[in-house]
Amino acid sequence: MNYFKELKVWQNAIDLVTATYKKSQEFPNEELYGLTSQIRRSAVSIPSNIAEGCGRKTNKDFANFLGISLGSAFELETQLIIAKNLNFMNLDDFKILENEIRHIQNMIIKLQSTL
């Protein structure tokens, strides 16, 4: 499967990256090389691993990269919980991102089950 741009999960993950970057711009400047950077890397890892997995030759390889992507989604969720707890974002913004992450997590799990 080489058409990763056609996958709804990849498209949603790209939207999540954009939303995450926009929200993390509001974090304190001293977090630029800390939590802000970590959150952005986790977010970018989700669609990146989906795309890389699509470029692999076997379903087993693709499933492995989906697993990495899923792990990054859980990592991002954890980091956003920390950001919320530190009052870097309000509860409403957190809930919007959390719901999108959970939707993507479920999509990845379903896609894995088809391979």
Image (cartoon, grey):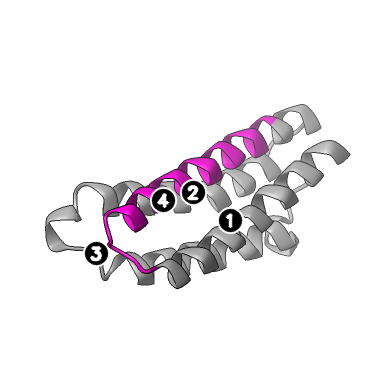
C-alpha span from label 4 to label 3: 14 Å
Q: Residue at 75% x, 42% y: name it.
A: 109
C-alpha span from label 2 to label 4: 6 Å
Q: Give the residue pinned by disc 4.
A: 81
**Contact check, label 4 and label 3, Cβ < 8 Å:** no
What's the amino acid at mark 4? Ile
**Camera-nearest label, 4 or 3:** 4
Where disc 3 sits, the SS reads loop
Q: Which residues are magenta?
A: 64-90
Q: Residue at 69% x, 36% y: name it.
A: 56
Q: Give the residue pinned by disc 3.
A: 27
76 displayed left or right of 109: left
Q: Give the residue pinned by disc 1.
A: 101
x then y, percent, for residue 4: 69, 55
**Main secondary structure found in the magenta portion:** helix
**Contact check, label 2 and label 4, Cβ < 8 Å:** yes
Specify which label sits upstream in the sequence, 1 or 2: 2
Q: Residue at 41% x, 53% y: name it.
A: 80
What's the amino acid at mark 3? Phe
C-alpha span from label 1 to label 2: 7 Å
x then y, percent, for residue 61: 70, 29
Where disc 1 sits, the SS reads helix
Q: Is residue 26 above or below residue 88?
A: below
x then y, percent, for residue 85: 33, 53
Specify which label sits upstream in the sequence, 4 or 1: 4
| Residue 68 placement: quadrant | top right
**Contact check, label 1 and label 2, Cβ < 8 Å:** yes
C-alpha span from label 1 to label 3: 19 Å
Q: Judge by depth and name the residue closer to the eye, 75 or 96.
A: 96
Residue 77's disc number: 2
